[in-house]
């Protein structure tokens, strides 16, 4: 158990995410995101929570999931190296600003260090000053890799 003073008397536990957590994670996702960005059970199951490449953790208190970090081991070629890629960090609005996101990232960092995964990477919108400030505070820095996208319009019948 990790005691986080900012939570008050509640004790918070951080543990690895499991496939059986998907439904509870989706409840939190649906509570906190706009409909157009919501994940589905199928999308989460595809990432195989608890599987060999999964590096996701969640925070819970009194049996309720209050936050999670979705991360995955990736092999990239710039240079060829193992990288932990963080896809999302999400904290229940009722528990935000209580250092839960920081605790999740710190737990992931410790796990990666023990597994000799020397790089954790995340993508941040250039105009998201709040998120950029948050991750810089946790030791992240701008890398020399630039993200480039090619998008396509979807066709519907």
Image: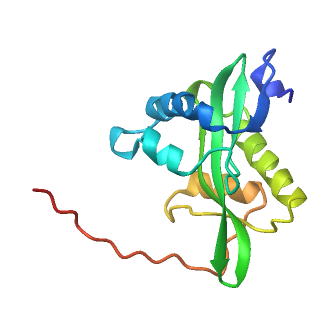
Q: Which of the image's four quarters has the N terminus? A: top right
The residue lying furthest to the left in this view is 157
Please identify the quarter of the rendering in which residue 10 is found: top right
Which residue is rendered at x = 86% and y = 52% of the image? 110
Q: Is residue 154 left or right of residue 22?
A: left
Q: Nearer the viewer, residue 18 or 24?
A: 18
Q: Nearer the viewer, residue 15 or 46?
A: 46
Residue 4 image position (x, y, % from top left): 82, 28
Q: In the picture shown, does residue 79 fall above or below 6?
A: below
Which residue is rendered at x = 73% and y = 77% of the image? 81
Q: Is residue 153 left or right of residue 36?
A: left
Please identify the quarter of the rendering in which residue 98 is found: top right
Q: Which of the image's four quarters has the C terminus? A: bottom left
Which residue is rendered at x = 59% and y = 48% of the image? 48
* Image coloring type: rainbow
Q: Is residue 155 left or right of residue 30?
A: left
Which residue is rendered at x = 52% and y = 75% of the image? 147
Q: Is residue 1 left or right of residue 103?
A: right
Q: How many marks?
A: 0
Q: In the picture shown, does residue 21 fall above or below 133?
A: above
Please identify the quarter of the rendering in which residue 65 is found: top right
Q: Nearer the viewer, residue 48 or 26?
A: 48
Residue 66 image position (x, y, % from top left): 64, 28
Residue 15 visible in rendering: yes
Residue 93 image position (x, y, % from top left): 56, 29
Residue 39 visible in rendering: no
Q: In the picture shown, does residue 16 fall above or below 147?
A: above
Residue 121 image position (x, y, % from top left): 67, 65
């Amino acid at each position: 158990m990790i005691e986080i003073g900012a939570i008050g008397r509640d004790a918070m536990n951080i543990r690895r995410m499991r496939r059986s957590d998907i439904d509870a994670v989706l409840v939190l996702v649906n509570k906190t995101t706009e409909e157009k960005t919501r994940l589905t059970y199928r999308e989460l199951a595809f990432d195989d929570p608890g599987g060999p490449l999964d590096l996701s953790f969640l925070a819970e208190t009194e049996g309720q999931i209050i936050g999670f970090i979705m991360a995955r081991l990736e092999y990239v070629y710039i240079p060829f190296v193992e990288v932990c890629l963080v896809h999302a960090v999400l904290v229940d609005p009722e528990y935000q600003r209580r250092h839960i996101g920081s605790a999740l990232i710190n737990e992931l960092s410790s796990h990666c260090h023990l597994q000799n995964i020397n790089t954790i990477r995340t993508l941040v919108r250039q105009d998201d000053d709040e998120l950029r400030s948050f991750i810089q505070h946790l030791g992240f820095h701008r890398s020399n890799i630039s993200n480039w996208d090619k998008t396509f319009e979807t066709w519907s019948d």
